[in-house]
Each structure stands twice: as C-alpha cells, then as structure tokens.
Image (tube, rainbow, N blue to C red):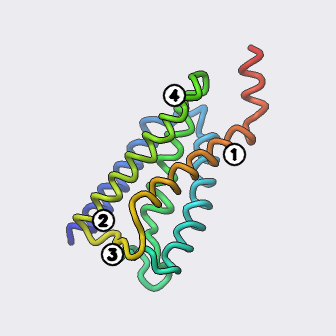
Amino acid sequence: MSKDKRILIFFWILAIGLLFRYVPRNKIRHGALSFLYKQIITWLFGLIVVEKGLIKYPVREFKKAYKGSFSFEYFLYPSLCVIFNLYYPEKRSKLFKFLYINIHAGALTLCEVLIEKYTNLIKYVKWKWYWSYLTMGVTYYTSRLFYRWFFQEEFITERNS
C-alpha cells in the first residue's frame, strides 16, 4: 500500500474518531446538517476547481467516476465542519468569532499545503494556498449562517431561557 493511501486511511480514521468523540448524542441532528451542507459546498467548489484544471488529485478513490478527492471533499472537510459548528463560540465577541473561523481555515490550509508539498494526494496547477484559505473561510462562514438559520428557533429558545 502506498504512503498516499495510508495517509487517506489515517484521515478517515481521524475524522471518524473526531465525530465519535466530539458529537454528543443530542447534537447528531446538528452535526448531520453541518456535514451535508459542507458536502454540497465542497462538491460544487471542488468540481469547478478540478474541471477548470486549477488543482489535480493524482491519487484518488474513484479514478473513473470523479476527478476530485472523495475523502477530502465528502468526508474530511464536512466532518471538520461539524466540529466547527458544534463548538462555535456563539456568546463570544465578534473578534473571537472572526479568529475562530480564521484559525479553522488556516489550520486546514496549512495541512493542505503540506499534503500538496509532500504527497501525491493534491497538486496545485494554477492554484495558490490563499485561494484554499479564502474558500475554506467562506464555506465555514456560510455553513454557520445556514446552521443558525436552520436552528433559529432553538437559538431563540436558548436566548430566552
């Protein structure tokens, strides 16, 4: 088994472990919403980026069916978005919330840059790290907006308690 395949397996195990560890039973619905929303967004962005030839995924799961990375776009990023939304610092300052989004997007971007540099899982063709940072930040932010909109009654009930 190649180093790249072992890394993909590690990411799957890590994501599953994070979900089991950090998603409480009473928040599974919340997690599912965040997961599915991020899947839709990453599918759209991932498809555009790959089809435009900006990024290549030399090692991937479904070589003939999909040019993107199934593991990253359909499982890892959505799993991390679940954690992002469930532990979002709702009652903190705007600055803290801004930093929270940027730390998540920055950490993911850093990991992606390292993966791009040292593996064949992703290769930037006409892409730069700052585009990843920007798109991840925007998708985290929009996932939060959608999450708040979808569960607005719970937020109102929480505030009035």
Query: Quarter-wise, where is residue 132 in the image?
Result: bottom left
Is the residue marked by circle 2 packed among few (<14), some (14-19), or many (20+) residues within 10 Å?
Answer: some
In the picture of the structure, the residue carrying the numbered disc 2 is 116
As drawn, the label of residue 146 is 1
Give left or right: position of 4 versus 134: left
Q: Position of residue 49 (x, y in %)?
A: 51, 72
In three-dimensional space, the C-alpha distance between marks 3 and 2, rounded to whole angstroms, equals 11 Å
Labels 1 and 3: the sequence-earlier one: 3
Q: Amino acid at mark 2?
A: Glu
Q: Nearer the viewer, mark 3 or mark 2?
A: 2
Question: Which secondary structure lies at badge 4?
Answer: helix
Quadrant in the picture for residue 88: top right
Q: Position of residue 1 (x, y in %)?
A: 21, 71
The residue beneath circle 4 is 96
The residue at the point 60 percent across, 32 percent down is 26
Q: What is the secondary structure assignment of the residue under circle 1? A: helix
Looking at the rendered structure, the kind of residue marked 1 is Phe
Residue at numbered disc 3: 59
